[in-house]
């Protein structure tokens, strides 16, 4: 006996095996139907005979006549038993058995993945495909709503959300005009809403969700289960909006609309400290909510050379913490070194300047200064600087990262921008400037809008230094807007 292949979708030869397998299943189904029809014919004949015996009889007379009483007893004891056995007795056909060649869920995903790639690369629209037009070779019928829905769900499974959305839209169109759709409209809507929200299309997802709840108010539970509502609530709570694709930002190809930039301003910031009165900060406000500013010329060339020199002697591959332990990852390709006040006066000087920028956030809860260097192609994928755990940065015991101040220690010839996809903001490195943003809402909750990434460096060397400032000790400088329970670390 031939070994059954473990995967089909990746070769046409194996896919042919599946077709013969399907034809064999159909033959067995034919056989089963023929046998079943014979059986039904027999059962009908028996039923007619049996019914004939009792049709219209007069009850007392019938059961008190010894012959008919006997016959009835015999029928119940024997005839119906036989019929029961006949009904129970299978036809002896399993249309699918252990020898049947069948694809797996993996194959379904594989085929869907291939389809999605073709859609992307050859610009094939679901509406076109559903009509049976597959780039030159035409199917001899159109697809049903149920089939479009299944393609959509397989694509969702593979996280091809935007193509999945096309198929769900198509499924809905077709559902409306079919006589006996093979799928419940609510299922389509439910998967569509989920896929939209996973694709960051929150406004559309909300529309579909409302449509579902209008049709079936009890459906909310399912949506929670499918996490559709969870994502949407996050969106509503955080006022998240669809992300600006991060490539667009990295290339500098996106400009925020005037409605979002007209309230921004630059100023000389003299703030609270007496030093600032002599040497005010050149502050450029990049975003009001969450508050993001850039300070120009806040680190001198001499200070920067010193930092880089110190960092060079101890720099090593950067890590990320996904859950728990720090790990090397392609999500963050750079090297870094940690410096503190003991290393050189320059660290203290920069710390003081960070204090000036932040209106005096207390240095007791600064982390060490983290100096980073990216190689060509080096990047850091979108992330938040705040941690999601119940007790963030437990090892440090100073709460979550309330603010980030990042110094740009080099110009970068091309690429290497810091981008905020939620805000449509791209900041291109300028040696000596520093960017500041607040990571947390006033109540201490992490602000998802601060999602940011370091774009790959295309040409040049990129150096930055991160100063992360934590929540503890800031109660008087940046009070929380209402009292929240602070988890006590023991
Ligand atoms: O290098 C950048 O532009 C951003 C770095 C960053 O986000 C980080 O190190 O957390
Ligand atoms: Fe970051």
Image (cartoon, helix red, strand yellow):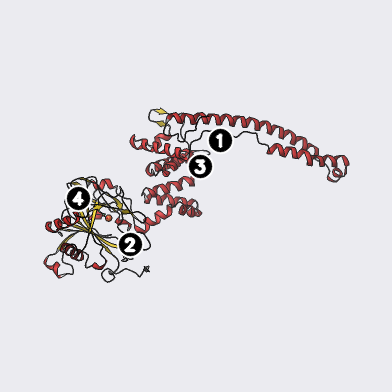
Alpha-carbon span between mark 3 and mark 2: 48 Å
Identify the residue at image location x=31%, y=59%: 386
Alpha-carbon span between mark 4 and mark 3: 54 Å
As drawn, the label of residue 183 is: 3
Q: Is residue 311 above or below residue 30?
A: below
Alpha-carbon span between mark 3 and mark 1: 30 Å
Q: Are marks 3 and 1 in contact (CB under 8 Å)?
A: no
Pinpoint residue 404: horizontal percent, then vertical percent.
25, 60
Q: Are marks 3 and 2 in contact (CB under 8 Å)?
A: no
- From the image, tell me which residue sits under label 2: 393
Q: Residues within 10 Å of mark 2 (few under 14, many from 20)?
A: some
Residues 209 and 459: in front is: 459
Residues 445 and 14: in front is: 14
- First of labels 1, 2 by sequence position: 1
Give the left or right position of residue 31, taking residue 488 as reference. Answer: right
- From the image, tell me which residue sits under label 4: 462
Secondary structure category for the residue under label 1: loop
- First of labels 4, 3 by sequence position: 3
Residue 257 visible, this orientation: no
Alpha-carbon span between mark 1 and mark 4: 60 Å
Q: Seen from this angle, which residue lies furthest front?
A: 313
Q: Is mark 4 within 8 Å of ligand 1?
A: yes
- First of labels 1, 4 by sequence position: 1
- First of labels 2, 4 by sequence position: 2
Secondary structure category for the residue under label 2: loop
Identify the residue at image location x=37%, y=51%: 203
Secondary structure category for the residue under label 3: loop
């Amino acid at each position: 006996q031939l070994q059954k292949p473990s995967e089909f979708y990746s070769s046409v030869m194996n896919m042919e095996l599946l077709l013969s397998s399907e034809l064999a299943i159909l033959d067995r189904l034919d056989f089963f139907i023929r046998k079943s029809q014979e059986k039904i014919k027999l059962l009908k004949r028996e039923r007619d005979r049996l019914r004939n015996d009792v049709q219209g009889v007069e009850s007392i007379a019938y059961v008190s006549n010894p012959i008919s009483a006997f016959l009835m007893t015999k029928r119940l004891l024997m005839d119906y038993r036989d019929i029961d056995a006949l009904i129970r007795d299978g036809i002896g056909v399993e249309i699918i058995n252990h020898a049947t060649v069948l694809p797996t869920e993996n194959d379904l995903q594989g085929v869907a993945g291939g389809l999605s790639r073709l859609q992307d690369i050859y610009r094939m629209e679901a509406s076109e495909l559903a009509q049976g037009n597959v780039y030159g070779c035409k199917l001899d019928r159109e697809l049903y709503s149920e089939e479009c829905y299944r393609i959509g769900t397989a694509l969702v499974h593979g996280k091809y959300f935007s193509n999945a959305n096309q198929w769900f839209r198509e499924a809905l169109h077709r559902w409306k005009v079919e006589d006996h759709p093979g799928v419940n409209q609510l299922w389509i809507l439910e998967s569509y809403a989920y896929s939209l929200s996973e694709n960051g299309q929150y406004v559309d997802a909300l529309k579909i969700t409302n449509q579902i709840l209008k049709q079936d108010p009890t459906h909310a539970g399912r949506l929670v289960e499918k996490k559709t509502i969870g994502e949407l609530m996050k969106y509503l709570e955080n006022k998240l909006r669809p992300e600006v694709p991060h490539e667009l930002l990295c290339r500098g190809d996106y400009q925020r609309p005037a409605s979002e930039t007209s309230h921004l301003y630059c100023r000389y910031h003299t703030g609270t400290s007496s030093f600032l009165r002599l040497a005010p900060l050149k502050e450029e406000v990049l975003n009001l909510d969450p508050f993001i500013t850039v300070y120009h010329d806040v680190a001198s060339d001499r200070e920067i050379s010193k930092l880089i020199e110190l960092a060079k002697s101890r720099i090593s591959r950067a890590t990320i913490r996904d859950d728990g332990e720090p790990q090397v990852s392609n999500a963050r390709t750079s090297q870094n070194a940690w410096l503190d006040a003991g290393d050189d006066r320059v660290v203290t000087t920069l710390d003081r300047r960070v204090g000036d920028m932040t209106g005096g956030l207390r240095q007791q809860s600064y982390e060490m200064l983290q100096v980073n260097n990216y190689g060509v192609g080096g990047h850091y994928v979108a992330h938040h600087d705040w941690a999601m755990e119940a007790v963030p940065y437990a090892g440090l015991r100073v709460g979550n990262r309330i603010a980030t101040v990042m110094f740009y220690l080099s110009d970068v010839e091309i690429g290497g921008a810091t981008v905020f996809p939620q805000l449509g903001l791209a900041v291109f490195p300028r040696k000596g400037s520093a960017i500041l943003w607040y990571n947390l809402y006033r109540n201490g909750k992490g602000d998802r809008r601060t999602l940011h990434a370091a774009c790959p460096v295309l040409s040049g060397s990129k150096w930055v230094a991160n100063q992360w400032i934590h929540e503890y000790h800031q109660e008087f400088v940046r009070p929380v807007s209402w009292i929240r329970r602070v988890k006590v670390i023991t």
